[in-house]
Amino acid sequence: MATSAVRGSILSFTKDPFFNAPEDSHTFIEDGLIITQDGHIKSVGPYTPQAAEGLTVDHYKDAIICPGFIDSHIHYPQSQMIGAYGEQLLEWLNTYTFVAEQDFASRKHAGKVAKIFLQELLRCGTTTAAVYCTVHVESVEAFFEHSSALNTRMIAGKVLMDRNAPAPLLDTAERGYEESRALIEQWHGRGRQLYAVTPRFAPTSTPEQLDAAARLWHEHPGTYLQTHLSENLGELAWVKELFPDCDRYLDVYKKFNLVGPRSIYGHCIHIDEPDFADFNRLNATMGHCPTSNFFLGSGCFKLFEAKKAARPVKVALGTDVGGGTSFSILETLNEAYKAAQMNQTRLNAFQGFYLATRGGAEALDLGDKIGSIEPGYEADFIVLDLKATPMMEFRMDYAKTLAEKLFVFMTIGDDRSVRATYVAGRKMEF
Ligand code: GUN
Ligand code: ZN
C-alpha cells in the first residue's frame, strides 16, 4: 500500500465563510500531520512523533498546506494564445482563438499542449479543472490520456460547434452527438476522469445541436455540462438576434434543458436577479473568471449578489485561459478581490481560499471527494511557501494573523508561492 506523510501547518474549510463567521468556517493545525494511503487521506491531526512513527515524513516549514486549487473554467487549446492583444470577445474569438484551435486536428500537437498545460496547472497548485478541448476528438483523447497518466481529477469535453465558426472547427448536431457519446463511454468515470458535454455557447450551436447536447447530458447521469453565458454585450445582442423568442440569454439554455446540477456557466457578467434566482432554483454553477473579464473588457462579476444568503448560487473560480491571463488561482483571487472592490464589496481571505478549494469542489458537485483535507478525501493538496521570494518573505514578516497571511498570498502570490503539489498522495514533479 502506498503511504505518505506530510507535516506542516494545515488549512481546510468545513463551512462556507460567505454565510458563516470565518473562525467557524475553517480548521487550522499549526503543526499538523497528514497521512495518505492509496491516494486518499487516511488521517489528519496534530503532529506527534508517535503518529509519524515508521513513516518517511515530508516536513514543510514556513509554509501553509491547503487543498489543491480548483479551476472551474479553462481552455487548454488556448495555452498557445494566452495574452493576445487588442480585441474583445467576438473579435478575439475570430482573430486568435479559432485560429489556434484548428491546430488540434493534429493528435501530436494536442498531446504536446495537453502535457504542457497539465504541468502548468500543477505548478500553479491546481489539481482539478473543468477543461474545454476543441471540436476534434483527438484533442479530448490527448487530454484525458495525459491526465490519466498523472492521475489528476479532471473534467473535460469536446467542444460542440455547428455554426458561426470556421469550417474546420464545425461538426454537426449528429456527428457531435456521436463523437461525444463515444468519448463519454471511453472516459467518463475512468479512473479520476470526468466528462463535460461542451456546447461552446449559444451562438455557435444550432437549436438541433443544443437539443443533442441536452440529450447527451441527460442520457449520461453524472456527466457535466459546461458552456458560456452573458460575458460580453456584443454577444448578448447576437444571441438576441439568433434566438428572438428568448427574452433573456439564460432562457436559451433553459429552453433546451441545459440548466441543472453539474452545469457550469462561465462568466455570467451581464445578468440580474431573475438569472440568479434561476441558478439557485435549478442548482447550476457560475464560473467566476476575473482575469479574463478584465482582460477582454467584459465586466465585473457580481459575486456578492450570487452569494446572497436568501437564494445562494453556487460559484467557483475560473482562470478562463487564454481569455484569462494567468493559470494561477492565487492571481485569479487577486483579480476577484478587485472585481469585488469595483462592486463596492470586499472578498476576505477566508472567502477567497474557500472559493479556491472546498467551495469550488462543492460547486462542481465533488464536495465529498476533493477540496478538503479530511479522512476519506482524495489526497490532493498543495504547499504554499511563506518565503517564496525575498519580497514575499519580507511582506509575510509583517502579516501576523492567518487571515493576513492568506490575504498576502491572495494578492501578491502566484506560481512561485507553490512549493509542492500532491496528487492522490503523490508529490508531483514540476
Ligand atoms: N465564449 C465562447 N467561446 C469562448 C472562449 O473560448 N473564451 C471566452 N472567454 N468566451 C467564450
Ligand atoms: Zn471560456
Image: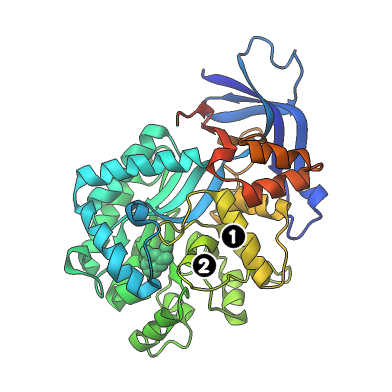
Q: Nearer the viewer, residue 252 or 381?
A: 381
For residue 312, which quarter of the picture?
Answer: bottom right
- Disc 1 residue type? Glu
Q: Which residue was labeled with disc 1?
A: 335
Quarter, ligand 1: bottom left
Question: In the drawing, does residue 382 fall left or right of residue 201?
Answer: right
Is any part of residue 362 visible from this angle?
A: no
Q: Position of residue 283 (x, y in %)?
A: 57, 65
Tell whether 172 sits left or right of 237.
left
Q: Which mark is residue 309?
A: none
**Is the distance from the Cβ of mark 1 to the nearest ligand 1 atom less than 8 Å?**
no
SS type, badge 2: helix
Q: Residue at x 23, y 55 (%)?
A: 136
Q: Residue drawn at (65%, 52%), measured in percent from left and top?
A: 411
Disc with the residue nearer the chain's start (1 vs 2): 2
Looking at the image, do the residues carrying marks 1 and 2 touch, with CB atoms under 8 Å apart?
yes
Q: Is residue 47 above or below residue 142?
A: above
The secondary structure type at the circle numbered 1 is: helix
Report, in whole angstroms, how far the alpha carbon at label 1 lies from the one at label 2: 8 Å
Q: Which residue is mark 2?
A: 294
Quick check: 370 left or right of 88?
Answer: right
